[in-house]
Image (tube, grey):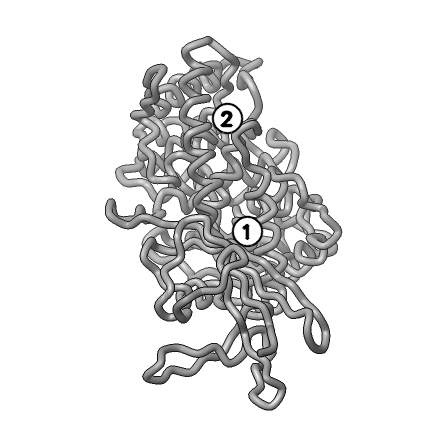
Amino acid sequence: MENRLGLFLVLLSVTCFCEANTTCYVPDTKKSYVTSLAINMAHSVGPCVPPDPSVLLALNLGQVKHPIAQDILIEQLKNDAVDRVSNNVSFTSGKVALYVLALGSSCVDPSDISVQQGSINLVKLLENKTREELHAFENERSPNASVITTWYQVGLDLLGLCTMSSPYAISAARIVANHTTPEVCGDVDTAAVVAMGLVCVLGMDNIPEKTLTEVRTTLSGLLHYILEQQKDGLIGNAYSTGLAGQALLAAEKYFLISWDCSGTIQKVLDLIPEKTFSLPTAAAQVLPFLWCTSYVSVKHLPCPEDDAHFISVEYTIVNDLVGEHFQYSTIIAVKEGSTLLQVMQKAAELDPNKFSFESTKSSWGVSIMTINHLARSTNDKTYWRFLRDSKALEVGVGRYIPKNNDHITAIFSKY
């Protein structure tokens, strides 16, 4: 098996990398599955629900935004982090790393978290906790060296440090590379997270050549192991597949990897209607893979301009008048000041099977001809009527400017 896999996994020069597998994407006919999964995950967020940093991280990496959920989570995570440190509440290194990744992906500086009850530097805290995790390995002669928690958490630590460009990430990567193997990791989840941490470090500057060689070698072994766990489209099991897919996609920048990514995506899509990923944490791990991104991408996420404010608009289309009845809803994030037409365009882009539409433009403005392939008809005296919270809009979709938390409904109606 080792020799055969060697034909499919080829290390590339760091300065020359292949493009991500262009066959690895969600078909248009199944994009609604992913959108629904993301929206359901976002709906798990609330003021009285303990914050899950992996949910915020997935939303920030994704193509579906939910400003209300994101804002709630940011404030919850900031307050919770300060509270944990101030009151000496358990805060493992992996948990700190997830907070760093989630807040960093939200364009919040994890090294300067300030709330009413105090302030902390999460990056410095993560550095200290990672040193504690790896302290036993500083003396390489120690026969009983072990991490304090798990290698999974250490993999998250490495990701968090690397995305924040912490110099200690390079030292930590050297130790991790010298002491992790597929056997040490023990499962696909751990191998995938450690692999992502090592991939991230490969993109850092000023890495000693010896460390680069060690990281590449260990990473190659971990990727071989992950590839060996493929069976019936899954990698390991349903819940490890998302992390494994993320790791393989991230590693494609440095390795030529041949694997049935489209088959894996199809298998994951088949499991969504079965509610396999209904728990928020499960959805949060698989969604980045379905969006063809990974936790490594946090390092390169753009931050919006200071004057760019986003609002959340719920958009619903309803037909209970003719043919096959339907009712579909989605939540769309757009820049403040956007028109309803732009909201509709964003909805159609995210889920064309449900929210596609056709329009015409005249001196009277924009007129909607069809939504979800259902056309208005002069003969039948039917048209698409737009309401805001059950009240008809007084201007057209090209002129109406939704407000934050508006609920706009398009109803197929008769006049």
Cα–Cα gap, marks 2 and 1: 20 Å
Which residue is depicted at the point 59% across and 38% down?
44
Of 385 and 44, nearer the camera is 385
Residue beneath disc 1: 289
Q: Position of residue 71 (x, y in %)?
A: 42, 38
Q: Residue furthest bottom?
A: 379
Q: Is residue 3 above or below residue 80?
A: below
Q: Position of residue 274 (x, y in %)?
A: 75, 51
Q: Secondary structure at mark 1?
A: helix
Q: Is residue 295 above or below residue 142?
A: below
User: Cβ–Cβ below 8 Å for labels 2 and 1?
Assistant: no
Mark 2 vs mark 1: which is more N-terminal?
A: 2
Q: Secondary structure at mark 2?
A: helix
Give the side of residue 255 with respect to residue 276, left or right: left
Which kind of residue does numbered mark 2 sit on?
Answer: Gly
* Residue 63 in view in this figure: no
Q: Quadrant of residue 382?
A: bottom right
Which residue is depicted at the point 33% across and 53% down?
336
Which residue is depicted at the point 29% across and 25% down?
112
Residue beneath disc 2: 94
Q: Quadrant of residue 28?
A: bottom right
Q: Residues within 10 Å of mark 2 (few under 14, many from 20)?
A: many
Of 314 and 166, nearer the camera is 314
Which residue is depicted at the point 32% across and 84% down?
363
Q: Position of residue 373 (x, y in %)?
A: 59, 78
Of 122 and 173, nearer the camera is 122
Give the side of residue 342 with respect to residue 196, left or right: left
Which kind of residue does numbered mark 1 sit on?
Answer: Phe
Of 36 and 313, nearer the camera is 313
Q: Position of residue 399 (x, y in %)?
A: 35, 68
* Residue 122 in view in this figure: yes
